Amino acid sequence: MTFNKEPIDRPFNWLRLGKMALLGLGLGFLLNFGQTLSAPLDAQNITLQLEEILQDIRCLVCQNESLASSQAALAQDLRNEIKNQLVKGASVEQIHQFLQQRYGDFILYKPPYKPITWALWLAPLTLLIVGLLVLLVYIKKFKP
Amino acid sequence: MKKFYIPIVLFGILVAILYYGMRKEASFLPSPLVGKEIPVFSLPRLEDHEKWTPKVMLGQVWILNVWASWCTPCRQEHPMVLQLSKQVPVLGFNYKELQSPANLKLPLEDQLPLAKSSAQLWLTRYQNPYFETVFDLKGSVGIELGIYGVPETYVLDKSNIIRYKQVGELTPEILEKTILPLVAKLKQS
């Protein structure tokens, strides 16, 4: 078998190009999939879980940043703490509770539903309903 | 014509609420630890190789003041802490004295003497208001206490229950109007 053949002069074929592209894409996916599987499942789970949890937690030092994005030293400490707790098998609820007991509800972006936050949770829906009612009344008035 | 005013009035109310929200100090947060007993901890003391725990304060009204030598607002509130220390024992809770990455790479037993000497330097230079200084090098007790902005000041009653928490530097106003009256009240009970 020789490899230094003359290049075959084939007409440009869109179908062929498409097939090749698909093959490449498929290979890429396979490789990616293999890589995903090769990492220890536990460690990866924790990393994913950690990322998800950190999105919902406020950095108290720089209040408009999440714990995931903050560069503050305290954020780093808390990230480590949360990771350790995840490794020890703590649930998301337990971690939220841990943080709430120390830093208060404000550390969670999603405040818990309780008497003091009722207004916060129910105001948008109430305003929407009131708005719709007002709108209905107006529309009825304009009817001939 | 009356209807025309309703949206304007509503808008005015909204502006007032938002303006109030803007003016309010955003860094002040109610601490869930107020009303609870101080978490149990044991930290190295400045003077010797012994550890200090809050248990020894039972029966006394006392103050826990979070500080570090790198903390600039700590120097601003320092005269207030000195004034406070004449009325009530103030514990210096040193939070993460070492900040440089090079120092933090040292083994822990080497970090402590370094932290102690740097804290001592600050205390000698500006006068030491604390009856005792303890070191939380890694900030782990800090997490238990919910510390997020140095300086912080806690007022504790005779049963070690946290009665007040101040995040950020003390001001003469807070000292006179809130902390000193609270200390006097707690001492009587």
Image (tube, coloured by chain):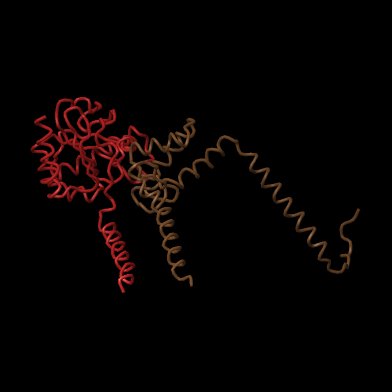
Chain colours: A brown, B red
| Residue A10 percent across, percent down from the top left | 88, 67
Residue projecting furthest to the right: A1
Count the labels in the image.
Answer: 0
Find residue B104 and report its image quarter: top left
* Placement of B77 over or under B135, stated as above or below: below
User: Closest to the observer: B14 or B68?
Assistant: B14
User: Closest to the observer: A3 or A13?
Assistant: A13
Q: Is B102 placed left or right of B118 in the picture?
A: right
Residue projecting furthest to the bottom: B1
Which residue appears at 25% of the width and 55% of the height? Answer: B24
User: Closest to the observer: B35 or B8?
Assistant: B8
Which residue appears at 32% of the width and 44% of the height? Answer: A116
| Residue B71 percent across, percent down from the top left | 25, 48
Q: Is B33 placed left or right of A111 in the picture?
A: left
| Residue B115 percent across, percent down from the top left | 27, 39
| Residue B170 percent across, percent down from the top left | 17, 47
Find residue B10 and report its image quarter: bottom left
Q: Is B187 placed left or right of B144 in the picture?
A: left
User: Closest to the observer: A15 or B85?
Assistant: A15
Q: Is A115 placed left or right of B53 in the picture?
A: right
Residue projecting furthest to the front: A144
* Placement of B148 over or under A5, stated as above or below: above
